Image (tube, rainbow, N blue to C red):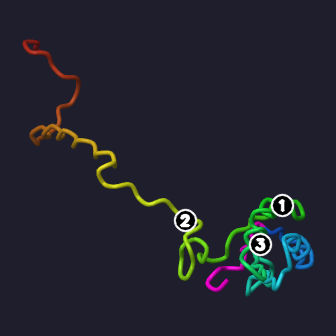
């Protein structure tokens, strides 16, 4: 199946899981051609994700369907396609869209009307001190 992805992204991997643990889980879906656990280049600690290659697309899709949310050392693994080949990206079909298209402009809600302008500032000058005086009252 040229142009189809056989590589599966495996996420949410527990940091204490070994490659052997993960290969044992991933081989439940079929033969694992290769497995790459990703490590931090500075600390040499696992980053919590990996890539698994299967021999064909059907096996890779079966792994995603059957092994997603499988528990490994107390965490549920998350599996997905490693690239966009099966999602309509370069060289692939359009089986799984990444996102829905944006709605047409005519169906979007209108912007709210503009707010009324603020009242004009009072004339400049010294501010009155004390409570306002009623007309006709002499202090």
Instruction: Write the residue at 11% across / 12% down.
Output: 137
Seen at 12% across and 37% down, the residue is 122
Mark 3 element type: strand
In the figure, 138 relative to 32: above or below?
above
Name the secondary structure under disc 2: loop
Residue at x 59%, y 66% (from the top left corner): 96
Q: Which residue is mark 1?
A: 70
Give the tally of numbered discs.
3
What is the number of the mark on residue 48?
Answer: 3
Determine which residue is flagged by label 2: 97
In which quadrant of the rendered view does residue 130 lie?
A: top left
Q: Is residue 59 above or below residue 107?
A: below
Residue 34: quadrant of the picture:
bottom right
Residue drawn at x 73%, y 87% as measured from the top left: 41
Residue 56 in percent (x, y) is at 75, 80
In the rendered structure, does residue 137 fall within the stretch colored magenta?
no
Q: Residue 62's x, y, as percent?
A: 77, 68
Q: Residues within 10 Å of mark 3 (few under 14, many from 20)?
A: some
- Local secondary structure at mark 1: loop
Q: Nearer the viewer, residue 89 or 119?
A: 89
Q: Earlier in the sequence, mark 3 or mark 1?
A: 3
Q: Label 1, label 2: how many angstroms apart (C-alpha)? A: 24 Å
Dots 1, 2 in contact, CB < 8 A: no
Q: Reading the chain from its start, which is encountered first: label 1 or label 2?
A: 1
Q: CA distance from mark 3 to mark 1?
A: 15 Å
The 10 Å Cα crowd at callout 2, few under 14, some 14 to 19, many 20 or more, is few
| 133 sits left or right of 17 in the view | left
């Amino acid at each position: 199946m040229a142009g189809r992805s056989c590589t599966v992204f495996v996420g949410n991997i527990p940091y204490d899981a070994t490659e052997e643990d993960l290969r044992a889980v991933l081989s439940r879906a079929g033969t694992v051609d290769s497995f790459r656990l990703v490590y931090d280049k500075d600390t040499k600690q696992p980053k919590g994700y990996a890539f698994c290659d299967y021999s064909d697309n059907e096996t890779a899709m079966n792994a995603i369907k059957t092994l997603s949310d499988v528990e490994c050392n107390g965490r549920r693994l998350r599996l997905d396609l490693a690239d966009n080949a099966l999602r309509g990206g370069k060289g692939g079909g359009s089986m799984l869209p990444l996102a829905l298209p944006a709605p047409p402009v005519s169906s979007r809600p209108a912007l709210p009307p503009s707010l009324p302008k603020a009242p004009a500032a009072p004339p400049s000058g010294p501010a009155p001190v004390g409570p306002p005086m009623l007309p006709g009252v002499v202090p």
